[in-house]
Amino acid sequence: MKRSLAYFGERALLVLISVIVLFPIAWMFLTAFKQPRDAYSLSLNFEPTLQNFVTVFSEPWNLGSMVMNSVIVATVTVAIAVPCAALAAYSFSRFRVKGRKFLFFLILSTQFIPAVVIVLPFFLMFRQLDLLDTRIALIIVNLAIVTPFVIWMIKGFIDAIPTDSEEAAMIDGASRLRVIKDIVLPMAAPGILTSSIFCFILTWNEFLFALILSRRDAVTLPVGLVSFRTERGDLWELMSAAGVMITVPIFIMALFIQKHFTRGMTAGAVK
Amino acid sequence: MAEVRLVDIEKKYGNFLAVPKQSLTIHDGEFLVLLGPSGCGKTTTMRMIAGLEDITSGDILIKGERINDKPPKDRDIAMVFQNYGLYPHMTVRQNIEYPLKLRGVSRADRKTRVQETADKVELGALLERRPSELSGGQRQRVALARAIVRTPSIFLMDEPLSNLDAKLRVTMRAELKHLHHELGVTTVYVTHDQMEAMTLANRVAVMREGKIVQLDTPKKIYAEPADLFVAGFIGSPSMNLIDGEVSGGVFRADGVEIPVTLEDRKGVVLGIRPEELAITQDASAAISGKLYALELTGESTLVTLRNGTTSACARGHADFEADIDSPCHLSPKDGARIHLFDRASGERLG
């Protein structure tokens, strides 16, 4: 009896937490398909429409260019950050250099600084370089944000790979770079893939720097959402439709990560 | 094939001296075993030969050429690791052909050599499997095949059999011995298993705390251990080591009186192997005490007696039977080798 009460309480708590977490998301998905007159109603009884999605992609909202900006900024950031981070992570994991721990801490410590503290120096720097409102500026800022995080993440995956296979490859005739290419990267592939997706998600969702550093040409999706707050009031149905456009790719990636996260590639390497 | 010379090599990790300065020559075509307990520096020594570990001072010469600064890939060696070190994302075929691929061997040639090598270690039918789909013994064979596929100058083997079960270990031991006979490649083999060392080696280097304490043929090491450590380490069951003293040409300990040729001295350890002791009914035998344990090993029975601080084991006939705690007497067989060591230093006295 005591046990079933505890069981019931535990389940009830889980349901409550799920409702709190999922309610805004469900609300956003429903509102995206509502007509403006139904936007404020909590009723599930409404006439669904795809008009909101058509509207956000047409003038004056032009979500298409924001999607393009977000895709380019996130993809290029991942394409640069992950290979660099993988090499750095390998070095931190394998080479016993003096000051290694301090250097690693230094890199990680960049994550402790609140973004709002450095956004102004970044703004001034990019204004000086005439890079304000460019994708390049956003890519540089995002690289600075995600690279330390990705180094830390990939290092964890490389640490878990036994060194025996690497040493065997070196004796078999491989150079250090060849060992990384032929042995380490394939073995760490699930981890690197997971890190890449995390990196993409972080960049995709980045708001503060994009808000300050972009005006018109380099506006990304999260910043674009703000434009639905107009003098006519908040256009919730359009904001929700744009929200769905932002969220769906991330949902798909999160599912992908979940699948790969638990897959071990090192099985069978040793013993 | 090649001769390997270690000249005054030393390895330090910070202030910790892992391998003190020493020299060793491994002859061309020889099977040399580095034997010792865990942490004695044998694997470090092998890794220095492989180039996986820098040497702090000294020189390593292969075929007379100093190779201290050469990376592992340029030393023309092959190594079998304790945990095999296979490439889990590659098939057995890709694992075996990897060293050939790195050396630019043509695809056709690679295919032939991989098949030949795989057949040699009975892996021919498993070439398309991945390591995770193989048993421990099969993985070990893949590691071996990868090492022999390109006939290097030197084989290095780091406890290659230690992860196998006892039966498979015996089979693989014979295969390694045969392989060495067939290929004649200079081999350095690291193990803590004295049985492996005795059965495989041309010469054994017994190591302790980083130092080679005895370097000789297995037969010689078994017959004339250089010190107390080697005496206790080699042999299964290990040599009986009895603490006592010598007075009037007789070694004395609790229940023990054995004539020896040594001047009067205290702190002496007498060593005698179990197979050189005979079980007797004679109450005036050299070693007397009460029967402590009987262990049937199949082909013989191990008889252990105790008397005070003395404990001695003899290898008796498989049919031998007696009651525990009954009086028991042992005497050295004719021609039995009696070893005497200094208790404090472990040095051999005679």
Image (cartoon, coloured by chain):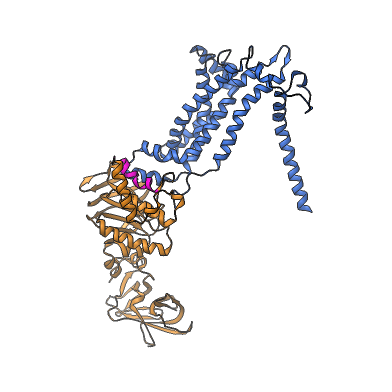
Chain colours: A blue, B orange
Up-down relation of residue B44 to residue A211 (above or below): below
Q: Position of residue B247 (x, y in %)?
A: 32, 78
Which image quadrant: the N terminus of chain A?
A: bottom right
Q: Is residue B85 magenta?
A: no
Up-down relation of residue A26 to residue B182 (above or below): above
Up-down relation of residue B338 to residue A122 (above or below): below
Residue B192 in the figure: left or right of residue B2? right
Q: Where is residue B333 in the image (x, y as percent from the top left)?
A: 31, 81
Between residue B64 and residue A157, name the one nearer to us.
A157
Question: Which residue is painted at 47% across and 38% down in the image?
Answer: A189
Q: Does the magenta stretch include residue B101?
A: yes
Residue B71 visible? no
Return the residue found at the far left.
Answer: B64
Q: Position of residue B250 (x, y in %)?
A: 31, 80
Residue B246 visible? yes
How many numbered discs, if any?
0
Chief SS of the magenta region: helix
Question: Which residue is painted at 25% across and 56% down in the image?
Answer: B183
The quadrant holding residue A22 is: top right
The residues colored magenta run: B92-105
Up-down relation of residue B200 to residue B263 (above or below): above
Q: Where is residue B336 in the image (x, y as percent from the top left)?
A: 29, 77
Between residue A40 and residue B50, name the one nearer to us.
A40
Residue B48 in the figure: left or right of residue A224? left
Between residue B139 and residue B204, name the one nearer to us.
B139
Residue B223 in the figure: left or right of residue B38? left
Residue B139 in the figure: left or right of residue A143? left
